[in-house]
Amino acid sequence: MLLTAYLTCSYAGGGVSRMEALRVENLSRRFGGLLALDGVSFAVASGERLGIIGPNGAGKTTLFQIVSGIIRPSEGRVLAYERDITNMPAHGRAAAGIGRTFQITNLFMQLSVLENIVLALQAHSRAKYNLLKPFLAYDGIVLKAEELLLEWGLAHRAAEPVETLAYGEQRQLEIILALAQEPSILLLDEPTCGLSPEEADKCVSVLQSLSRSIALVLIDHDMDVLFSVVDRVVVMHFGSVVADGRPDEVKADSKVQQIYMGAVDEYSRS
Amino acid sequence: MKRLGLWPALAVILAGMCLLPWVISSYYLGLATLILATAIFAMSLDLIQGYLGLASLGHGAFWGTSAYAVGLMNTRLDGAAGLVGEFAVGIFAAAIVAAVLGLIALRSKGVYFLMITLASAMMLWGVAVKWRAVTGGDDGIVGIGRPSFGFAGMDLGDHTQFYFFVLAFTVIAGLLMYAIVKSTFGKVLEGVRESEVRMKALGYNVWLHKYIAFVVAGVFAGLGGILATYYNGYVGPSELHLVTSAEALIMVILGGAGTLFGPAVGALVVVLIKSIGSGYTQHWMLILGALYIGTVVLAPDGVFNLFLRWWRGE
């Protein structure tokens, strides 16, 4: 099993050796009798953009839950910048540079848009343990939050509770919160899920324009979105990696075609 | 007016409270004193119930523990520890109980948190009832005197002066708690209420924030318990009983969870109904129950939010 880990990480940006941002080794996770992840291994180079596809139930989100520290693996290891973080709590991983978004919108619904972003920005400051200084009295942080809102065209909604935002705006905020953390490894769980084609296009161009200093791991069901953003694709099926390579290689892979084309009826019905 | 927010209203209320001793009888002044101490208790529960989103049925544990600590100290040492000493011990006792219960209760949430806090407080109630040698059992501790207070010749034995003494503590505690809920720490608590997982993913040590909030709430509840004990001159197991904790929970819901000052209004309503209603009928709980149901149906976010909407002209 470990051998596959070493084999799959051979990709390193066309032969130029780059620092490894994230590596998962032989990850398995059981939920009772269900083996949601079964020996998953791959690595992501610093600045690389990796896409993860697979039918529903392939274990993609479980993988994110483990990498971000929300749940623990039954077996295997997670490494960030060659440091073992398998047993590190979620907040420690965030401090180590791992940011993530959620498949199902996960925001502070009753707080304002500005407050959501300021919370994200203050996560790594000492301010979070200050019991007396008002939340919005940190001028530098509030200014930064306002800049982010301007950049994303949400400035006019700054004072609104997030629950009053349109769905597309909430999905945008998902990404803003993760970016506000200034992660070096960003996990995006179906950022375009439920968006209109126009909104999805906007999202894609934002992802394309992200700094190359961020290693990106993107889950998306929309192949067009995925293939237009990533450098490399990992295909998962029933908790295992069945293919790993450049987008054109993966598209041509017979196993992948069988999963997506051969079994079309099986998955389109569910 | 809008920019000033609520402060003018609070200033008027405070001014009214300062005039109270010359307006109402000494019986009602005593009641007002008890309401103020109870208001600290209710506001402290709101820190975890309203802001953190963890409803507790064991908040009386901190209120009652500090009450017993002060009662014991006061009667055993005959007041020799003085006001500051007794306060320090009472607050410390509440903090210790919160620090220990927090370790156990904060592993859970929702209804499990409710049940664990309930069980913990009732265990302390059991100790208070059974450990007669120390707690006096069902009889409690009687004859707790108000210690002398070497400040501007104040005599806490005097109803009016004691009222102002408690009022000062209530105002300071209320302002401190207000600062806390408006601080970054307070907003983090709201973030945890809204989405614990997101807070973790952003890099917040959620457990530590919950724990600090739980202990801080316990300390303020303890302060309320001390003041109530000096008012009553007596402490009994009922201070630790489920009913005390449940009343606090009702005060928070009546006033409006997550509004901080709302639960103080809840304290006013509950203590008034309990004291005045019980003078007319032993079924005063019915009045409270009807009011509770009415609030939940008509103003589910509490009377304070009703007031806020009116104040802002909505």
Image (cartoon, helix red, strand yellow):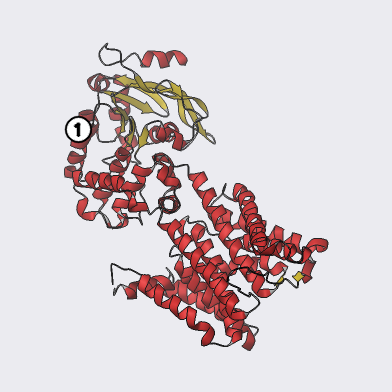
* Coordinates of residue A247 in the picture (x, y in percent): 24, 23
Of residues B7 and B211, which is closer to you in this image?
B7
Residue B108 visible, this angle: yes
Residue displayed at 42% across by 46% down: A128
Residue displayed at 41% across by 29% down: A238
Instruction: Identify whether A204 is placed above or below B113.
Output: above
Residue B245 visible, this angle: no
Residue lying at the far front of the rendered structure: B152
* Coordinates of residue A132 in the picture (x, y in percent): 43, 54
Give the SS element for disc 1: loop
Of residues B194 and B98, which is closer to you in this image?
B98
Q: Is residue B144 left or right of residue B12?
A: right
Residue displayed at 27% across by 21% down: A250
Instruction: Identify whether A124 is placed above or below B298.
Output: above
Q: Which residue is mark 1?
A: A209
Q: Quadrant of residue A25?
A: top left
Please, what is the three-letter code of the amino acid marked with disc 1? Ser
How many numbered markers are drawn?
1
Q: Is residue A159 left or right of residue B248?
A: left
Q: Quadrant of residue A195?
A: top left
Of residues B101 and A14, which is closer to you in this image?
B101
Q: Is residue B294 left or right of residue A42?
A: right
* Coordinates of residue B49 in the picture (x, y in percent): 50, 59
